[in-house]
Amino acid sequence: QVAKCTLAGVLSSVATVGSTITTVAQSVVGSDGNLYMFYNNKVVRVSSAGVVTDDVFTAIPADMRITSACRYGSYLAIGCAYGTSNTASPTGRSQVYIWDYVTTTTAVDVVEWGEGALQVLGNIEGRVVGVSNKYLETPAGLTSLAVGRGAMVVRMWAGGTPRVMKEIVANQSVTLGRFIRNVVIKDNKMYCLVLFLYNDK
């Protein structure tokens, strides 16, 4: 369900969505003045009048989940990772869908974001920046990498192909590496929290 909370702390349901909610992503106010909320592979629009519309953009495949979104000029960049649960293995390739807020069935562009699970997106000086979890939680995947370890990968995109800006390789076998998916943009910098727990043997 979609609910609202008054300043007095009263919580009330305003809409029921059409699918069971498995995963969610941080909401975004679009350049059109509407609030966009994300669950599974679905986009929910909340108008300034409080009208809730479910599943307003249907181009995202059912085997992917929305992990993060940000404004990109007059568009919305919607980041997706392969898999349908928050605990899905960070394998496969991620994509970013560039949406015009209007067309319901097709994206303006689909950006191939590369290997690993894209976790957070942000707009820094007109460029989309994303941080991916590349096999940090997949022991089998670690051995297949040339460097022998998983990594956190930072990419930047403003048209064309996303460019790898930084790849931070894990220095130990990671038994659990979980991104906290909230992201904050302040003073043209992107802040997100990454928690690593290592196997110290």
Image (cartoon, rainbow, N blue to C red):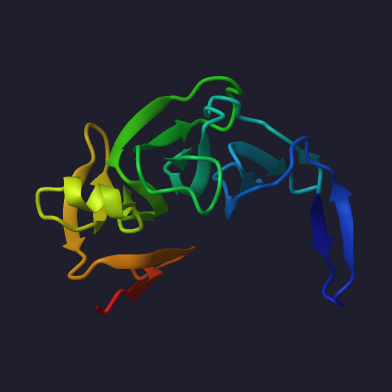
Q: Which quadrant holds residue 95?
A: top left
Q: Quadrant of the C terminus?
A: bottom left
Would residue 108 appear left or right of 198 to someone viewing this image? right
Find residue 77 and report its horizontal and vertical position in percent: 44, 41
Q: Number of marks in the image?
A: 0
Would residue 15 appear left or right of 89 to someone viewing this image? right
User: Looking at the image, is 182 positioned above or below residue 113?
Assistant: below
Q: Which quadrant holds residue 167?
A: bottom left
Find residue 80 and report its horizontal and vertical position in percent: 45, 41
- Is residue 143 in sight in this rendering? yes
Would residue 201 appear left or right of 25 to someone viewing this image? left
Find residue 176 and report its horizontal and vertical position in percent: 39, 66
Q: Nearer the viewer, residue 155 or 195?
A: 195
Query: Who's the residue at 55% across and 41% down the image?
Result: 84
- Which residue is situated farthest in the front direction here? 201
User: Looking at the image, is 42 positioned above or below residue 58?
Assistant: below
- Which residue is situated farthest in the top direction here? 105
Q: Which quadrant holds residue 148?
A: bottom left
Query: Who's the residue at 47% across and 38% down the image?
Result: 74
Find residue 94 and report its horizontal and vertical position in percent: 37, 39
User: Looking at the image, is 29 positioned above or below residue 20?
Assistant: below
- Is residue 189 in sight in this rendering? no
Q: Nearer the viewer, residue 187 or 65?
A: 65
Q: Nearer the viewer, residue 178 or 30?
A: 178
